[in-house]
Image: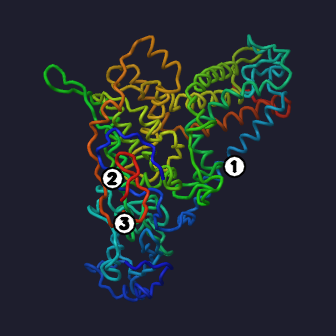
Amino acid sequence: MTVVEESPRQDIPGVPVRIGQARGGPPRSQVLRRDNWRLQPILVAAGLLVFIGYSTWAALRNGDFYAGHLGRDYLSPYYSPCLTHSCTTAGYVWGGWSWWRISPAWLILVFPGAFRTTCYYYRKSYYRSFWLSPPACAVADAGSTNPGGVRSRYTGETLFPLILQNVHRFTWYFAVIFAGILTWDAIAAFRFPNGIGLGVGTLLFVAQAVLIWAYTLGCHACRHLCGGGLKRLSKAPVRHFFWKHVSTPLNHHHQLFAWCSLISIMVTDLYVWLVASGTIHDPRII
Amino acid sequence: MSVPTEPRTAGAVAGNGTAGAGAPAPHGTSATADATGPRQLHLQLWRGDADGGGFVDYEVPALEGEVVLDVVHRIQAEHAPDLAVRWNCKAGKCGSCSAEINGKPRLMCMTRMSTLDTSQTITVSPMRAFPVMRDLVTDVSYNFVVAARIPPFTPGPPEPDGTYRMAQVDVDRGQEMRKCIECFLCQNVCHVIRDHEDNKPHYAGPRFFARLAELEMHPLDTLDRRRLVSEQLGLGLCNITKCCTEVCPEGIHITDNAIIPLKERVVDARYDPVAWLGRKLLRRPRPAPASAVAVDLPVARGAHDPTIDGRSDPAVLGRNGRRSDG
């Protein structure tokens, strides 16, 4: 094996460490784990596939995403901000893109989709569950035990397209904008025809906004921008304050908020669809 | 040593449990004993070296309060005096007894038998990412070579009174990384080198990403190691599957508090045009690149034993990164 490192000093003798030789020990293809290590990647893959499947259906639906005609200012998160004429009553200044022919959800989903795709937690999830690289700790990468096979070489996130994971912080900027839009939707959900009110849908919108913010602000890129990139946090007390509170509990529970916010988006959209299509009536609490 | 090419049976080596059954219980603490005698533990230990080997069955009586290392020591004392096992403190602080117990990388001295399903056979095998020297002992020299490639802590000039001062809040982040006991379980479980041997020459691994993060966050350090960690130490190869965090016996959040912060710092340096523009406009002073002091790196320490590396044509990674003969 050729080693490519440049040497800072040529007069220092090499330390002999074998690379590329037989290691001994049990064969790498032999899984010695006794626990049910397949369960977690299967559950994660199932969860992500359900979300992808539901989101595809919701985006293709292109209808019943706004319940304004039934006296409820509920707008599906898949269609927020509202870009079409069908929800201009919601007061969105950007509504009324009559020239946009396909579902506006596709245009909207690009941004939160990119944020979640490049998210450090979701990367772990799909690398394990779909790439099987590795499927579980101490279980060999799929294909790595076949010398010369298609998966025998591993380059991680150093080459295109996975090197694009480094844009995560830029997707975070858009995620903050969308979290703000969903917050506005939650506020709008309090508007009823005869004033301020509270419906079951309102609670769902509020919960969704809270979870989205918890997930967005707990992002590792946010944590870095708050102060993680500093050498001396003591010299920047404001950034230290934000860094500390982003780190714990938000970043510490990033995985939890990732799933909860994902589920809340689906539940909110489903509820809006059921209300907007007239399938159910939204009970008013106050 | 003679290396078994096929797994040997218990009877061939350990008397199929009958030898262990009669062993006296230390201090009479055979709490699991009942009318039929002490309950038996079934273990499979890996015996062999880099050229081959296999699992060998052993049976010993169960004793209360033991850890896996205790059982391995009993096997060594009573059935297999030639069994090689590395250990030192038996307190989870020296990082010597790393192995894979039922396929999971763990410290043998910190794995209680009561946490394992002793109704089934327990396997103990050497760490898979490193060459087996003998039985449960692996050659972890690779890690020491990597360690020597990391430019050391380089403080700036002291303050006028000749001292250095650090705020506690600045020290706290790096303190977590200093809990590392260098058991190399994280290095072992990292699939980048565990499953892809060819990455070893240009990949530092989780333990040393933690070290690099500690240095990068150190309030007194003056070096910029971001380019080094990105281009030569393979940070981009890590796909943050968090296995290193899962196996760390010290509970260090290696991925969240070391690797991801390092990745974000590399983004600052290499992929973020906004950060680049900010540096240019604000004319922030740039820390010295790590290569500026690389010539002062200490000479690497590592295994020089010719019996380990004296093979006909070993491909070896040298301290200076060039191929050399063992």
Amino acid type, residue under disc 3 in the picture: Val
Q: Please identify, in this view, whether the residue under mark 2 or under mark 3 is nearer the observer.
A: 2
Q: Give whichever of A162, A92 is nearer the camera.
A: A162
Q: Please identify, in this view, whether the residue under mark 3 or under mark 1 is nearer the observer.
A: 3
Q: Which residue is mark 3?
A: B137
Q: Are marks 2 and 1 in contact (CB under 8 Å)?
A: no
Q: Are marks 3 and 1 in contact (CB under 8 Å)?
A: no
Badge 3 marks a residue whose secondary structure is strand
Please name the residue shown 75% across and 24% down the image.
A107
Could you give the CA–CA distance between mark 2 and mark 1, rounded to whole angstroms? 47 Å
Question: Could you say where residue A18 lies in the image, as x and y percent from the top left?
Answer: 41, 58
Nearer-N-terminus badge (2/1): 2
Question: Could you say where residue B52 lies in the image, as x and y percent from the top left?
Answer: 47, 72
Badge 1 marks a residue whose secondary structure is helix
Q: Give whichever of A42, B82 is nearer the camera.
A: B82
The correct choice, above or below, for B322 with respect to A229 in the image is below
Badge 2 marks a residue whose secondary structure is loop
Q: Which residue is mark 2?
A: A15
- Horizontal arrangement in the rendering, residue A241 relative to residue B306 (left or right): right
Q: Residue extending furthest left?
A: B161
Could you give the CA–CA distance between mark 2 and mark 3, rounded to whole angstroms? 20 Å
Pinpoint the chain carrying mark 3.
Answer: B
Quadrant housing the C terminus of chain B: bottom left
Say which quarter of the image contains residue B33: bottom left
Q: Which residue is mark 1?
A: A46
Question: Could you say where residue B273 lies in the image, as x and y percent from the top left?
Answer: 53, 20
The correct choice, above or below, for A119 with respect to A198 in the image is below
Say which quarter of the image contains residue B183: bottom left
Amino acid type, residue under disc 1 in the picture: Ala
Question: Could you say where residue B255 lies in the image, as x and y percent from the top left?
Answer: 46, 42
